[in-house]
Image: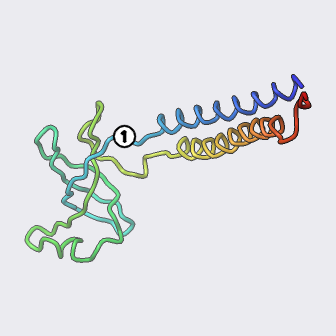
Amino acid sequence: MVRRWWSRWCVLVAGIALIGMSVALLEASEPPELRQIDLTVLSEEPDGRCEVRWRDPYAERDREGAYRCDTDRHALLKAPDYDPQTGFGWDSGWVLAEGDRKGELYSLDEYDDTGANIGAYALGLGLVVTYLGLRSAGVRLRLRRRPGGGAPAEG
């Protein structure tokens, strides 16, 4: 009797611990705060490698750097069709909005979502284990309250 009660609590505590671990993993694996900006494409390779110029929204100055442009964007946005006078193209990009690299270009390819994936699986597993722990405790309670069960009526 004591062993069954203890094992049900262990299952329930394990499920809650898995849920807590998954929340911590999901919180730790959040992507950084980003801000979307317009990029002037100075030069572009067919594989998407670009040299771009952007206006840093935090330092109020123009900056240049390498970026991976969207190769599937419309041809009118590519050089030289976008701006025939300068021969430049246009794309949209992301800069970091916090930290010591604030204002630097950020590629979404840099984000590693392994922790988020593990956290999502752990959350699902934790919910199932918690459900099983609660369900087994509920079955036990229903067995105790079975109609006609218990002590005989005194008469």
Q: Horizontally, is 153 left or right of 101 in the view?
A: right
The one of 27 and 86 positioned closer to us in this rendering: 27
Q: Position of residue 106 (x, y in %)?
A: 33, 47
- Residue at point 48%, 39% (across, down): 29
Tell me the quarter of the image containing the N terminus. Answer: top right
Vertical relation: 76 (above or below) 99: below
Residue 142 figure quarter: top right
Image position of 96 (left or right of 4): left
Residue located farthest toward the left when viewing the structure as drawn? 85
Q: Quadrant of the C terminus?
A: top right
Image coordinates of residue 62 in percent, x first then y, are 13, 47
- Element type where label 1 sits in the image: loop
Q: Where is residue 89 in the image (x, y as percent from the top left)?
A: 20, 67
Viewer-nearest residue: 135 or 10: 135
Query: Badge 1 is on which residue?
Result: 32
- Note whether 107 is above or below 5 in the view shown: below
Q: Locate residue 49: give its quadrant.
A: bottom left
Can you say whether 105 is above or below 12 in the image? below
